[in-house]
Amino acid sequence: MSNGKKILVVDDDRDLVDILTMVLTGKAYQVVQAYGPQEALAAVDREHPDLILLDVMMPEATEGFHVVWNLRGRDDPYSATVPIIMLTAIHRETPLRFYPDARDHTYGAGEYLDVQGFVDKPVEPDALLAEVDRVLAAARGP
Amino acid sequence: MADQPATESPQVLPATEVLVWRISWLVRLRWLAVVGSLLFIEVARRFLPIQVALPQLLAVLALLASYNLGAELLLARLRRAAEERLAHGQAESAEGSVGRLARILLPRTPPGIEYYDARAAQAAVLASVQIVLDLCFLAAMLHFAGGVENPLWVFVIFHVIVASILLSWPATYGVATLGFLLMAAVAFGECFGVLEHHPLNAHWRADGYLDPRLVGAQVFLLGVTLFVGAYLASSIAGRLRRRELDVVVLARHLETKNYHLEEAFDELAAAEHAKSQYMRKVAHELRVPLGTIKTALSVALRVAPESMAQQPRELIQRAERRAGDMAEMVRELLSLSLVRGAEAHPEAVPVDLWAIAQEILDEMGPRAEEAGIDLTTHIPEPLPPISGSPQGMGDLLRNLVGNALRYTPSGGRVELRIQRVGDEILLEVEDTGIGIAAADKDRVFDEFFRSFHARQIVPGGSGLGLTIVKAVVDRHRGHIAVESEEGKGTCMRVWLPTG
């Protein structure tokens, strides 16, 4: 269950952020909202969320990727490990390879995305909640 | 963009090449004439009972030789200049007085075709001057070797033939006329005592040259010979030249056509690119709000109180389903434009079909289970990698398996088989579904095509799935075949080259 875990929802579509917030607060998660990459990074520093739901933020740019690379490139253990779920079906549509578990430096930044899960858009509430549960459970450790 | 065809500045034209070559041939022939004349004079003096004005003849031959030397030098200069011009990649068109003269001297060309360049014009003038001089030399030599008594007058016909090969038909008749006039002038000049007669043979018809009737008859017959010769030679040469020109015109025509074709092809490619870009932009723009609508509707259903009336609930469900169909269609449009877009051809990488097949099966497994369909795979041996796009192959398998599941009733079977056949990979997706009508088989790959039957059974669906499949197959230089029987099932077969 949620145990009041704090989730940061990042998407440039404010309606979607509100809708996802509704779904998550309905399951007693705390939600922090952000609408852009800078805001997202600021919110991470300020709120230290337990999980980040991150949109890839197309078509302007793949700014969502840069948020991931920024966080994973930092030195502190929290930023390097805070679980991230990408809100996109991008793993099916781009030549980027995604190896969520590959932290052994086989791949450089830009070659893979160090994220823990994906939720396809359009977001299915059930699928979202299931993925959030799964990733949070995995983050707690076996 | 293709280069503009060289209509303005012709490259080396075959006609010019031939003309310059022919003039050098003319110069060589003249050397032959000088040497031949010397030999003939010597032989004739020894073995024939004739006499000639030797000092004058030798003087004429010496003049001929020096004039030929001059012609040789001029020709060499003409050639060098032409080569230089060629090296600079430019050819001038014939202008000025030389150009005007050349237009008369050279055979006519169809409008719009610059068959000759400035070099050809110079060569034509040079050739004409030479032919005129040659006639004068011939007349002089004959004058010093018996005049009208000398049977070699008919040699004038050689000049007419040469003129017909090199020059236009008026110029050819001009040469014939000049030859005729020169000969007549010498014959009648000697006849009436204006010119001194150098008898060829003291014993034979020594006075003939003095009889105007005899001279006239001979001049007349020579004239007939020359003009008939001019007519025959120029008509044959003209016909040959026309055929040559036809080839040039045809080549030009083809060149222009080819240029336009290339241009049209470029435009087509640009249009296709623009279309694909536009499609992607539109798809992106539609996708975000559609996704949000669909999610909003599903959330609305979740948060709605249990007490919500059945009718509005059903309406929201229906709206959510249709929004989902539409989002799926937009997604397919996007992947189609990605497969087709020229810029979306990332470098081919080795693709592990087995891994992709597993991924797709994991994805499709729950759907098959839900629909009560037995989804199985058969990959009997390790597969060699194919070269291409993993996303493309994912799209291909997802669409083929997805289609099979969609159109197979509960209790049916869908099997994915991948095997190596020779140096190809054969990928088959076989189902026990509704099948495709024979009449529709050719159309299933068309954009947005959905058979009547398919629409009846599954209302949603974009009709883009197989279009995407075909685009992916084409991009991997493979081929696809449909085997289907209505009511029995369908087997889609895709062959992909390995390596």
Image: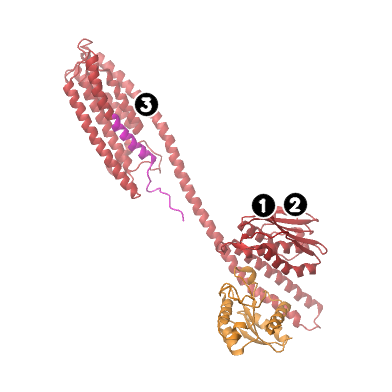
The one of B324 and B361 positioned closer to us in this rendering: B361
**Do dots 2 and 1 share one subunit?**
yes
Specify the quadrant that holds the C terminus of chain A. Answer: bottom right
Residue stretch rendered in magenta on the structure: B1-29
Q: Amino acid at mark 2?
A: Ala
- Disc marking residue B231: 3
Q: CA distance from mark 2 to mark 3?
A: 71 Å
Does residue B200 sit above or below A66 in this rendering? Answer: above
First-in-chain label (2 vs 1): 1
- Which mark's residue is nearer the viewer, 2 or 3? 2
Mark 1: few/some/many CA within 10 Å (<14, 14-19, 20+): few
Q: Residue visible at 76% across and 54% down?
A: B484
- Disc marking residue B422: 1
First-in-chain label (2 vs 3): 3
Q: Amino acid at mark 1?
A: Gly
- Which mark's residue is nearer the viewer, 1 or 3? 1
A63 lies left or right of B208? right
Q: Secondary structure at mark 3?
A: helix
Q: Would residue B475 be visible to someone looking at this image?
A: yes
- Disc marking residue B438: 2
